[in-house]
Image (tube, rainbow, N blue to C red):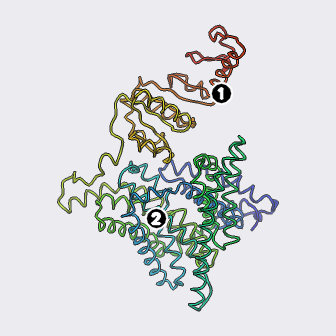
Amino acid sequence: MAGIGFGSGRARGAAIPHDTDLILILSVALPLAFVMGFIAMRLRLPAIVGYLITGILVGPFTPGVEADAELAPQLAEIGVILLMFGVGIHFSLRDLMDVRKVAIPGAVVQSTVATLLAVGITQLWGWDVRSGIVVGFALSVASTVVLLRALIDADLLDTAHGKVAVGWLIVEDLFTVLALVFLPMLAHDSSGDQDIAMSLVVTMTKVVVLVVGVLWIGAKLVPLLLVQVSRTGSRELFTLAVLAIAFGIAFGSAQFFGVSMALGAFLAGLVMGDSDLSHRAAEENLPMRNAFSVLFFISVGMLFDPAILIEEPIELVLVVAIVMIGKPLAAFALVGALGHPARTGLVVGAGLAQIGEFSFILAEMGRGLDLLPDEGYSLILAAAIVSITLNPMVFHLIPVAEAFLRRRRGEPEDSGERSPPEEAYPPPMQGHVVLCGYGRVGGLIAEVLDRAGTPYIVVERDRGRLEPLRARGIPVVQGDAVETSVQNQLSLADARLLILAVPDPFAVRRMAEVGRELQPGLPIVARTHSAAEWRYLEDGRVDDTVLAEYELGRAMVLRALHHLGLEWDDRSEPGVLPLYDGSSPASLQ
């Protein structure tokens, strides 16, 4: 099956050169993924659903456009490496330790229950025990991406319940890493227990040597290398260094230690996360990681056979039941047994009622090791699509389920099971400054506000940047400023000033509109990098707009004239270098 063909009236790929297969996949699949992802988001579904459907549409099992399925595993492998690398960079041991007493035992027991359920039903189907274990591993781990999106949409991310759910998934992520080590051993074709035990010892020894070597040597070399590269001032060289480290360690781990490249990529991310430049590394790598993550989901969809929905509906219902009923009930019972409120159990259970990217990674590896039949792979993918699609509805049922439990126990509506106020959102504020963005620009602004004694609240997506502020008692909100759930926490109607220091023009536009809606007279200061965006914002949408390049040029001119012993009157020559006095600079027309 080569190339991409259209329709059924000609041989697929007959007039298309074989060496353009990858280009054609990118040309057809990415635009279609954009359309399907956009439609999914408009329907308030995760974009992952759109990407998976794209893969199904261009796969070999559906009519019309057909992509080269032989390229799918390679694209998926690249996506896995970048996904696991990103998980390693953002892995937070602190988040895990904060909720370790419930997340660690809960995740261990819940994963065991899900795996045993999967082994049980696959035994009824006559499958090998090893296939059931792979299915169980894949069904036991939920998608961190889907969970975070659901928690944000439900205004639960910064609550005590949301923190437990996130910590729970961190433990499951670690299980995934261990499973990536265990699956090759499970595929060991030996009938002797002694040989299996020896293989286990050898494999675990290799893993220990790899982990210690990468973390010890990498912790010394990687930060030093990144500092030296950053001093060159070359952005593309820095990006190349990050990718070289990720793929180099991933490939070396597989080539010399016989483990999966996904495990090597995770270790590379851990090493990168210890560097002072980890935030920059994550930002520089983000566009490529996002692009190949999309290709990963497309590739997974290409390997899915929709016929299983008709041919084996009972099997699919059972698999979905494990994900959306078995796992949530087990989690709810465990959280209650560990002494936590019912609402925490409901939030954790709802968050676990789906499977996603790590399930695909495990299923793909099991398929490659001949541990999982194609039928099992399709069942896992179908369960993922169904559970991800229905997961937002599960979160909407949390208040209903909570009210039902209270009525059963005869408790009043306000039973005190909600999170303490200090654990949930920042307290309501008045006369404060809302600062969106805490990068290099936002950090300077915050420093000035601190010195002036002006109260402010910070909005930032990067959790690592917020931890020092949170430790100092400064109100912070983690998330994207364009999200309604984030905006609701900022007390914009009572704010004194809104500062938009984020580089994303879409976020700047949206926040400016929200600020005007909630408080028409709210002063707004924004940054921008383009003349077109400057004109848009200056048209009554914000009070002051800072165009970075012009402000930089103005400052350099003033300093240059100072060294030359000259003076320059800005007002006498407004066309030379514009000042932002409310008029439109001539050079921007």
Q: Vertically, is 296 above or below 559?
A: below
Give the camera-side residue of 422 and 165. Answer: 422
Q: Quadrant of the N terminus?
A: bottom right
Name the spot of residue 421 as percent of width and height, x first. Answer: 30, 46
Mark 1 sits on what residue? 549
Q: Quadrant of the C terminus?
A: top right
Q: Vertically, is 330 above or below 507?
A: below
Give the camera-side residue of 96 and 366. Answer: 96
Callout 2 secondary element: helix
Q: Amino acid at mark 1?
A: Glu
Q: Mark 2: give few (<14), some (14-19) or many (20+) Cα within 10 Å.
A: many
Q: Amino acid at mark 2?
A: Val
Q: Which is nearer the N-term, disc 1 or disc 2?
A: 2
Label ID, residue 171: 2
Left or right placement of residue 45 versus residue 577 in this view: left
Name the spot of residue 245 as percent of width and height, x first. Answer: 68, 57
